[in-house]
Structure formats: structure tokens, C-alpha cells
Amino acid sequence: MTRLVLVLVLASVVTPRAHAQEDARAIFRRGVAALRDGRYEDAERAFVASYRADPRPATMCNLALTYDEQHETREAAEAYERCAATDEEGRFRAHAQERALALREELAREAALPVPPEPEVEPTEPEATPSASPFVEAPTTTNVPIVEHGAPTEAPSRSHTLAIVGGSVAALGAGAAALGAVFAGRSQDGLDTLVARHGSEGTVVLAEGSEDAALLQDARRDRRIAIGAYASGAVLGALGVTLIVLDLLQPSGTAVAAAPLPGGAMVTARVALR
């Protein structure tokens, strides 16, 4: 019977404590949401109530941050000091100590300077600004780096698009020249065959429709194709080299380039240079 009474007494003590901690965590989450939204008065009330129910260092640190965002320097410094003193795990201690020291120095400077008279202005409601990240998992700082206007910036990387296109065009030119060499060789082989059959001196009359006449016609056709391929290869090669040079110089403006292809086709390209 004594053991049963003892268990009941312990359960009656532990259960309200657990409920209190659960309620404190819920209030703490509401305070974090209010702090992120810039509703500092709501955040302050939530963190104070949560800390009274369950005094955790994270709650005190968020309360200090709330005071800091409202420019309540003395209250923020005291809350940061309490946060650092109660943070046994050291998760927020370094930041809290650093911020508390900075606020104490600010209070000392304000105490040493004469207080200027306040100008008579109509009261206006201050605009809420988004606060820094609350102390939910790890400490953060409210200080934001300032970038001066006119500071040198890193130049954007060049894509070398013209060089890539120029290399491709030059490769097409080399291919056209190689094709011309193939047809030139075929034409020369046909002429060599005719010379071997009929000799190289004197005028030879070939009968129309004969095998030799067809061979001569094919040799002349291959020669025309070879000349066209050589010309196209030279133009494409020159165009490719030009595009590569333009990529190295990077001038401003628009470049227009055209090149003939075998068979009479024409390739025209308009390239915008930046």
C-alpha cells in the first residue's frame, strides 16, 4: 500500500511538469513565428511566458534578440548575459557574450556623451522590419555585410561561343577540302586510264556512248566537284579563323558572314558580338 501511494504521488508531480514544458515549447514556437514576422511585442510576451514555464537558454537568447531588434539596449544586454550564463551546452554562449559586450560598450558611450534635445516631430508608427533568424537550432548574428557602391566586381566568364563556332566552321572547311581531294584523285585516275589506253600524243576521238567516253565524262564531273569543294573548304576555313580571331578580340557589334557550299548553296550567319 505504501508503494502504491508513492507511485501516485510521483505521477501527480511529474505529469504537471511535463504538461508545463509542453505548453512552454508551444508558446516558444509562437514567439519564434512572431519574431520572424517582425511582431516584436508578441514575440516578447511569448518568450517571457515560455521562460517562466520552462527556463531554457534558447528562450532567453530569443528574448534577447527580440529586445535587440527593438533597440532596447539595456534589456538586450542583460538578456544576452543571462543566456550566456545559463547555456551549459555552449550552443549560444559565444554569440551571446559577444553581443552583450557590444551592447555594454554602446551603453557606456551613450552615458559619456551629452544627450541632445529631441526634435519636435509628429509621432509616427515605426515600420516593422524582418528580424534575424531566431535561436532555434544555432546562433545567428544580426550583422549584415555592407557592399560599397562602385566596388570592383568580378568580370563574368567568357563563353567563347565564337571560338567554338569558328572551330566547327573550320572543321567543315577541312572536310570540304578532304572531299575535294577525293574527287580530284578520282578524276586523275580516270584520265590516267584513258592515257594508258590511247596514249598521250595526238588527238583521240572517242565514240559517243562508249565506255571511254563515259569515263572521260565522269573524270570531268569529278574535277568540277573537286574544284567546288576546294573553294568551299578555303572559304569555310577562312571564316572559321575569322570567328576565332573575333572571339579573341571580343569587339562590339554584329558580324555577318557568308560561305558557299558545293552545289551552289550559300550559308549566311549573323553573329552578335558582346
Image (tube, rainbow, N blue to C red):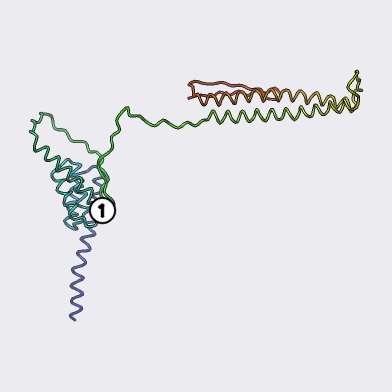
Nearer to us in this view, 107 or 271: 107
**Picture residue at 78% right of the left edge, 26% below the top:** 222
**Picture residue at 83% right of the left edge, 24% below the top:** 217
Q: In the image, residue 171 lies at what x, y percent?
A: 63, 30
Name the residue furthest bottom. 1
| Image side of residue 115 versus residue 204, left or right | left
Q: Is residue 104 above or below residue 219?
A: below
Q: Is residue 2 above or below residue 123?
A: below
Which residue has dot 1 on it? Answer: 91
Q: In the image, residue 20 lies at what x, y percent?
A: 20, 60
Q: Is residue 93 above or below residue 131?
A: below
Quadrant where the image shows the N terminus: bottom left
Nearer to us in this view, 210 or 223: 223
Nearer to us in this view, 101 or 24: 101
**Picture residue at 60% right of the left edge, 31% below the top:** 168
- Amino acid type, callout 1: Arg
Q: In the image, residue 41 lies at what x, y percent?
A: 18, 45
Mark 1 crowdedness (10 Å alpha carbons): few <14, some 14-19, many ≥20? some
Q: In the image, residue 15 lies at what x, y percent?
A: 21, 66
Q: Looking at the image, how many numbered discs can be counted on the residues?
A: 1
Name the residue furthest top. 203
